[in-house]
Amino acid sequence: MEEIDRAIVAALTTDGRMSYTDLAEKVGLSVSAAHQRVRRLEQRGILQGYAARVDYPAIGLPMTAFVAIRPLDPSQPDDAPERLASLPEIESCYSVAGEDFYVLLVRVGTPADLERLLQKIRQAANVITRTTVVLSTPYEGRPPRVGA
């Protein structure tokens, strides 16, 4: 990836709503050249979309937790992500190395909501869970280091 493309990616990960005029000025291109480069980065799958950052407590989801799961019977099909996909409280599902098979990032309103969600996860995917509740988030969603 060219250095100018790295600069575009860095700028857009900091502010995905940046106008093409501001982006062009920031990376030293014309507006049309910046637009063309962004379109190519999107076509190549480097830029995969744009999203809003959400203040979860403000929308009634102040509790964040990581739920590690592993199957009760490891000989059964590895289909936990599919079985859990319908649970909206699960924001992300990460396949991991180590003792656990997956780690889920979940957001809920109360400890009771978390308890109910854990029951749903165990029943739906036939798994053992290990939960870590987030106490605070010093930072999250930092832009990636876009280096050579």
Image (cartoon, helix red, strand yellow):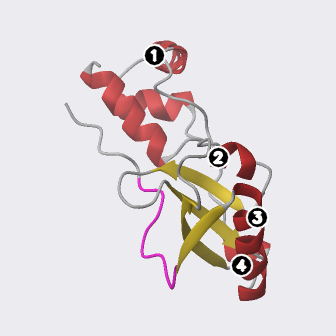
Q: CA distance from mark 1 to mark 3?
A: 47 Å
Q: Is residue 140 above or below residue 137?
A: above
Residue neighbourhood size for the residue with mark 4, other residues' Cα within 10 Å, grouped as few (<14), some (14–19), many (≥20): many
Helix, strand or loop under label 3: helix
**Residue 96 percent across, percent down from the top left:** 42, 51
Residue to which mark 1 is pinned: 37
Gap in angstroms between the C-alphas marked 4 and 3: 14 Å
Which residue is pictured at 71% across the width and 64% down the height? Answer: 121
Query: Magenta region: which residues?
Result: 133-142
Label 2 with label 4: CB-CB less than 8 Å: no
Instruction: Kindly identify the amino acid type of the residue bearing the numbered disc 4.
Output: Leu
Inspect the image, locate mark 3, and give the three-letter code of the amino acid beneath it: Gln
Q: Nearer the viewer, mark 4 or mark 3?
A: 3
Instruction: Please tell me which residue is depicted at 55% across the width and 39% down the height of the picture.
Output: 18
Give the mark nearest the N terminus, 4 or 1: 1
Q: Secondary structure at mark 4?
A: helix
Q: Is residue 9 above or below residue 80?
A: above
* Disc on the earlier residue, 1 or 2: 1
Give the number of the mark in front: 3 or 2. Answer: 3
Q: Earlier in the sequence, mark 1 or mark 3?
A: 1
Residue behind mark 4 = 114
Image quadrant in which the C terminus is located:
top left
Q: Earlier in the sequence, mark 3 or mark 2?
A: 2
How far is the residue under mark 4 from the one under mark 1? Answer: 44 Å
Q: Which residue is mark 3?
A: 123
The answer to which of marks 2 and 4 sits earlier in the sequence is 2
User: Tag on residue 66?
Assistant: none
Quadrant showing the N terminus: top left
* Observer-nearest of 4 and 96: 96
Task: Give the residue at mark 2.
Answer: 81
Is residue 83 part of the magenta span, yes or no?
A: no
